[in-house]
Amino acid sequence: MMNGTMWLPILQKRITFETYRSESGAEYWMDRWGHNIMTQQWETGRVELADWDESSSALRTIRETVFIVEQGVPEGLEWDGLDPTCAHVLAWNDRGEAIGTARMQQNGTIGRMAVLKDWRGRGVGRALLQTLLDLAVKQGLARVTLSAQIHALGFYERAGFHVVGEPFMDAGIPHRRMERELLLPQTGPERQ
């Protein structure tokens, strides 16, 4: 078990956590109230929150590979200066190699979802997205939005997003704006 703290810009506070390992070997973080926080297990790895300052090398490498090299996105568009204020998630395979990432801005805009080519179609993107959705609920956001590349619309629709607005071009790639309403936990007295 490991104890630690992490500054989450999106929550504007430092969280304290303890890291545990389940019987299956999955690693997860628990906050001081015993809630599993921001770690999703998938078939051969894990997804967890990542601090930009500590993990920028891994985050940048994945995004450079997917967006700049594979898709031809100009560097100036990829590095928009928002990363230090975003919540980031990082996917790791069972060998401890970083294989995917995504981020969420403080207003609930999800973006920069990237999974290395050899790991696509294996649940990594779904785990990245679910981790950010869990964080948005914990943050109390009622809605999250994103700009999806046209080829990924089905992926996001299966995750509960719906298209809003007309197609548009971003970095020379056709996109659609999408959003999803979130079910927030009930607070206050139970209704009978």
Image (cartoon, helix red, strand yellow):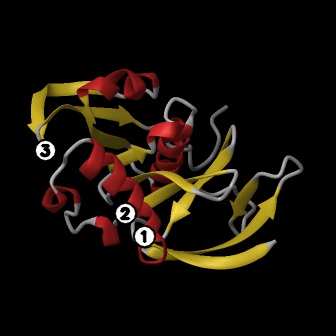
Label pair 1/2, CB-CB below 8 angstroms: yes
Determine whether the residue tagged by mark 3 lies in a helix, strand or loop.
loop
Say how many tags the image has: 3
The residue indicated by pointer 1 is 57
- 55 in relation to 131, above or below: below
Q: Measure the alpha-carbon separation of dots 3 and 1.
A: 23 Å
Picture quarter with the N terminus: bottom right
- Which residue appears farthest toward the right when viewing the image? 23
Please tell me the numbered disc located at residue 171.
Answer: 3
First in residue order: circle 2 vs circle 3:
2
**Label 3: few (<14), some or many (≥20) within 10 Å?**
few
Q: Residue at x 36, y 33 (%)?
A: 180
Residue 44: image x %, image y %?
Answer: 69, 42
Residue at x 33%, y 72% (from the top left corner): 84
Q: Residues within 10 Å of mark 1 (few under 14, many from 20)?
A: few
Q: Quadrant of the C terminus?
A: top right
Placement of 151 over or under 10, stated as above or below: above
**Is 75 situated left or right of 117 in this image?**
left
Side (left or right) of 29 relative to 185 = right
Looking at marks 3 and 1 on the same chain, the residue that comes earlier in the sequence is marked by 1
